[in-house]
Amino acid sequence: MTAKKFSFLVEDLSKQDHGLIMVMGKGGVGKTTIAAALALGLVDKGRTVNLSTTDPAAHVAETLREQVHGLQVSRIDPKVETQKYIDKIMAAKGPSLNEDEKALLLEDLQSPCTEEVAVFHAFSHIVAQARSGFVVLDTAPTGHSLLLMDAAGAYHRQMMSTFEKQTGSSVNVVTPLMRLQDPDYTKIILVALPEGTPVSQASALQDDLRRANIEPYAWVLNRSVLAAKTKDPLLVARLQGEVKQMQRINDGLSNNLFAIPFQAEPPIGVHALHDLLIK
Ligand SMILES: Nc1ncnc2c1ncn2[C@@H]1O[C@H](COP(=O)(O)OP(=O)(O)O)[C@@H](O)[C@H]1O
Ligand SMILES: [Mg+2]
């Protein structure tokens, strides 16, 4: 078998004392579980960690079940971020406007664009936080995470052209996209299940990221029966499918593959999550 134990991924990541770790993949593959386990593993190694989610379902708290000393848990909630953003704009511009102008501005701010910009601001803030500690980002199960990258890309291009116009040359500006493209700063963990369709979906996600010049750091195959090392002859025979998917990943999708065994019980709670790190 050519997948490493999940605990080695924590070993590798903890060689640094800061950075952005983004856990990505389709809904239900185990992103929240893996993000929580990685965050716990890094806290165990004495690192400062903020476990953050953009997932509207936000199962992080339920997955951990309890507060962990040294682990901050936060969430980018589009509704909350949008209100914060509107309040900020109104506080800045409101005093110089009359009541009609204020009502007009408020109406303008009720557009879907505002939510995108507000979420992007929150995302940039989280990205920048990883300068001085770990941020483990449990991303949304939908194309939401890619939208965020797109927003980061648009912001990047706008910043660059403004600066280039002002100075006549490209300058020293660090944008969120540059941080996402920097392999020392950002490590993307792609999660898949050891079956044909989920691996193809993760592969498509990897292609999307590569188009944005972002190279995933590692793949995690979750719920692997192969990694659970079963001796049941019937299961072993059925594991050919898993063997095939592992080979497929090894043969060109990633050279940094980790596997998490299928657990009889869903790994919920700090204790069960810790178990993922030692098995
Ligand atoms: N290795 C595993 N073995 C058994 N169950 C798992 C495993 N990893 C995750 N689960 C369970 O699968 C479900 C989906 O996992 P979750 O982390 O919420 O996925 P996602 O965040 O990608 O939607 C949860 O009930 C979780 O407890
Ligand atoms: Mg989740």
Image: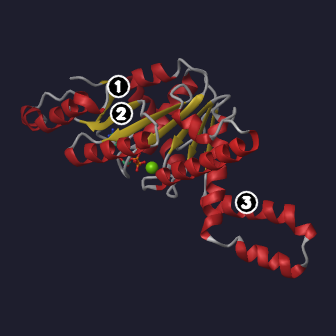
Residue 100 lies left or right of residue 140; in this view the side is right
Q: Which residue is mark 2?
A: 219
- Secondary-structure class at tag 1: loop
Above or below residue 136? Residue 86 is: below
Specify few, some or many for label 1: CA neighbours under 10 Å numbering under 14, 14-19, or 20 or more: some
Instruction: Please name the residue shown 79% across and 59% down the image.
Output: 88
Instruction: Please name the residue shown 19% across and 30% down the image.
Output: 247
- Secondary-structure class at tag 2: strand
Disc 1 vs disc 3: Cβ atoms closer than 8 Å? no
Q: Mark 3 belongs to which amino acid? A: Tyr
Specify few, some or many for label 3: CA neighbours under 10 Å numbering under 14, 14-19, or 20 or more: many
User: Residue 256's mark?
Assistant: 1
Distance in Å between CA atoms under marks 1 and 2: 6 Å
| Image coords of residue 177 (percent x, y) | 57, 41
User: Residue 53's mark?
Assistant: none
Which quadrant would residue 227 be assigned to in this image?
top left
Instruction: Please name the residue shown 13% across and 27% down the image.
Output: 231
| Image coords of residue 234 (percent x, y) | 7, 36
Above or below residue 15? Residue 200 is: below
Q: Which residue is mark 3?
A: 85
Distance in Å between CA atoms under marks 2 and 3: 35 Å
Using the rendered image of the protein, determine whether residue 228 is visible from the camera's viewpoint: no
| Image coords of residue 157 (percent x, y) | 60, 47
Which quadrant would residue 96 be assigned to in this image?
bottom right
Residue 74 lies left or right of residue 265; in this view the side is right
Q: Mark 1 belongs to which amino acid? A: Asn
Number of numbered discs overlaid on the protein picture: 3
- Secondary-structure class at tag 3: helix
Q: Mark 2 belongs to which amino acid? A: Trp
Disc 1 vs disc 2: Cβ atoms closer than 8 Å? yes
Coloration mode: secondary structure
